[in-house]
Image (cartoon, rainbow, N blue to C red):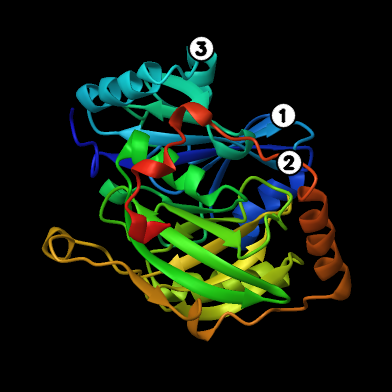
Amino acid sequence: MIDVFGSVQLGYLVVESNRLSDWRRFGADAIGLHVDTLTSDVSRFRIEDHTCRFLLQRGPAEDVTAFGWQVTSHEVFDEILSRVTARGLPVREGTPEECALRGVERLWRFAAPKGGVTEIFTTPTLTPEPLRMTASGFVTGDSGMGHVAITSKDVLGVHSYYATLFDARLSDFILERIGPMKLRIRFLRVNQRHHSVAIANVRQVSADPIRTRIQHANIQVATLDDMVASFERVTAEGFRMMWSIGQHTNDRELSYYCRTPSGFELEVGWNPVLVTPELESTWEPTTYPGISTWGHTPVGEDVVHKLTMFRHAVTSLTHAEATVPQARHPEALPVSVH
């Protein structure tokens, strides 16, 4: 069996929303991304020469519907597919139209945790078209476009999903209190980016306070000036800031969080730690007692927002979370990660 660690990276996100005009203004004017409007119902965001990093399609979900993961070779692509099919997980090849919209050569689709879809692809379509964006640049490369953070009632199931299919490794844990909730967050890496997936669960209670499939997505800007300038533009353009600029304890990234038009958050960050090959050989997961060394204070958090989170948490107690049982093998994880 091939070890696919280091050969997988987050490639794109697919978002379904009826607020496309707000999304286009959010992407271009606030965050500083390149926006391509294909039709009145479809837009794409670029941050470098990849044709697509965010695909926005009209629809009622107001959520991320699919996660695109780029693999570095056809050999690795076939290895992941063999793991999926060997476990009886239904797969479907992407249509030519789906591939064209995402700017990829070929893709296969199968279930992801929390009712989403995982899409794996090999070769992205690159474009020589000059970027039209306010930011000076974004950091992607072999580590991918950033990360996603998920809240889950089945944290071991989500962890084992990515460990089973992508050979994800545990970077560390964070213990944090947000309002009345005590969270334990685990951070998984699939390459030298400190984490491509973060998974949070409410301790001692099987509840999920977040309506959407992800709590936030992260993108990494090229310079500190880019981050500060976009922070100022978000507020100036009338979008809601959620957490002020601060620095994380574990990956040392400087960042802020704002709310997207669909309700989940976008983290814009700068200069996180990389788990390089030199660090990889001696890396040991650590538990940090807090998410930030400084900053990341709530901005304008009101009673309505807190009540909304509480309502979602209570509702989730009576609803089963969508899982992927074929790739759910928490017993295969080391005892130390439970």
CB of mark 2 within 8 Å of CB of mark 1? yes
Label whose residue precedes the other's in the sequence (3 or 2): 2
Q: Tell me if I can see residue 93 in this picture.
A: no
**Mark 3 and mark 2 residues within 8 Å of each other at the beta carbon:** no
Q: Residue at x 74, y 64 (%)?
A: 239
Compared with residue 59, is residue 194 higher up or lower down, i.e. above or below?
Answer: below
- Residue 326 lies, in percent from the top left, at 47, 26
In this view of the protein, which residue sits in the foreground, 60 or 89? 89
- In the figure, 329 relative to 137: above or below? above
Q: Residue 175: image x %, image y %?
A: 51, 74
The residue that label 2 is drawn on is: 20
Secondary element at tag 1: loop
- Specify whether 281 is left or right of 54: left
Q: CA distance from mark 3 to mark 2?
A: 24 Å
State the residue in front, 229 or 98.
98
Query: What is the secondary structure assignment of the residue under circle 2?
Result: helix
- The 10 Å Cα crowd at callout 2, few under 14, some 14 to 19, many 20 or more, is many
As drawn, the label of residue 213 is: none
Q: Quadrant of the N terminus?
A: top left
Q: Which residue is mark 3?
A: 95
Q: Position of residue 152 (x, y in %)?
A: 60, 51
The amino acid on which the numbered mark 3 sits, given as a three-letter code, is: Thr
Residues under labels 3 and 1: Cα distance? 19 Å
Q: Earlier in the sequence, mark 2 or mark 1?
A: 2
Q: Earlier in the sequence, mark 3 or mark 1?
A: 1
Q: Which mark is residue 41?
A: 1
The quadrant holding residue 54 is top right
